[in-house]
């Protein structure tokens, strides 16, 4: 476990009881804006964004329950993470936890964006509340649609960090 994460977890734990409590807009549970989120296997520190009314939409615990596993490597995919959508070969036996995504009659499975599972051209969405794919064009789709070169400065901020440069 990384030292900076351990320090952040310690500081969050110490200050947790002193922080303001909010009522989440959608799930209606009480929550803090920052705290530990568990997906059943791992614990991360989650920082909640506020909605326009000044409260978060979901509590940290509900966001943790919205986590899924990658259909290919079984690593967790938490809310807000970049995802891939791969169409398997006909003989692929999907694990029971795999999340299916269908677009224009084509079935795909939700996968993670880890380097062991995907490459940067395959990013095509984010896993978002309440547990669904928010589809965006992949860098490869952007490249084909623009007939240009796509540069992604910061993968965590994709697609906002993507820029298209014409090929001369």
Image (spheres, rainbow, N blue to C red):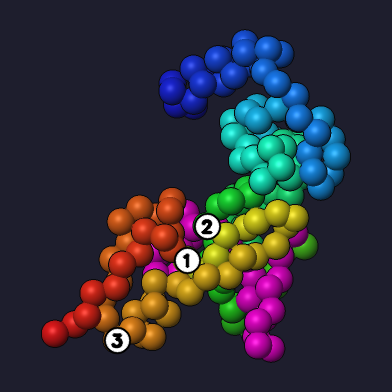
Tell me which label, 2 or 3, sits earlier in the chain.
2
Tell me which label, 1 or 2, sits earlier in the chain.
2
Residue positioned 43% across, 51% down in the render: 156
Q: Nearer the viewer, mark 2 or mark 3?
A: 3
Kindly tell me whether residue 36 is visible in this rendering. no
Q: Nearer the viewer, mark 3 or mark 1?
A: 3
Kindly tell me whether residue 15 is visible in this rendering. yes
Whole-angstrom CA distance, mark 2 to mark 3, is 24 Å
Q: Which residue is mark 2?
A: 82
Q: Quadrant of residue 4?
A: top left
Kindly check if marks 1 and 2 are in contact, taking CB atoms under 8 A apart as contact. yes
Kindly check if marks 3 and 1 are in contact, taking CB atoms under 8 A apart as contact. no
Disc 2 crowd rating (10 Å Cα; few below 14, some 14-19, many 20+) is many
Kindly check if marks 2 and 3 are in contact, taking CB atoms under 8 A apart as contact. no
Q: Which residues are magenta?
A: 97-122
**Apparent side of residue 152 relative to residue 44 in the rendered image (left or right):** left
- Residue 87 horizontal/vertical position (percent): 59, 78
Q: Residue furthest front?
A: 53
Judged from the image, the secondary structure of the residue bearing numbered disc 2 is strand
Q: Which residue is mark 3?
A: 147
**Front residue (pair 21, 107):** 21
Residue positioned 59% across, 19% down in the render: 12
**Front residue (pair 77, 139):** 139
Q: 51 above or below 33?
A: below
Q: Which residue is mark 1?
A: 123
Residue positioned 29% across, 86% down in the render: 147
Residue 75 on the magenta span: no
Q: Quadrant of residue 73?
A: bottom right
């Amino acid at each position: 476990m990384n030292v900076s994460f351990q320090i952040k977890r310690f500081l969050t734990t110490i200050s947790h009881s002193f922080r303001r409590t909010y009522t989440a807009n959608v799930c209606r549970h009480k929550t803090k804006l920052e705290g530990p989120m568990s997906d059943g296997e791992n614990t991360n520190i989650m920082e909640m964004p506020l909605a326009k009314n000044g409260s978060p939409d979901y509590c940290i615990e509900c966001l943790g329950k919205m986590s899924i596993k990658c259909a290919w490597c079984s690593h967790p995919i938490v809310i807000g993470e970049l995802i891939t959508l791969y169409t398997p070969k006909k003989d692929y036996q999907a694990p029971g936890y795999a999340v299916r995504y269908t677009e224009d009659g084509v079935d795909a499975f939700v996968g993670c964006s880890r380097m062991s599972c995907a490459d940067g051209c395959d990013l095509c969405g984010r896993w978002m509340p309440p547990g669904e794919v928010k589809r965006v064009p992949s860098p490869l789709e952007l490249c084909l649609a623009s007939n240009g070169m796509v540069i992604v400065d910061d993968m965590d901020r994709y697609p906002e960090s993507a820029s298209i440069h014409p090929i001369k």
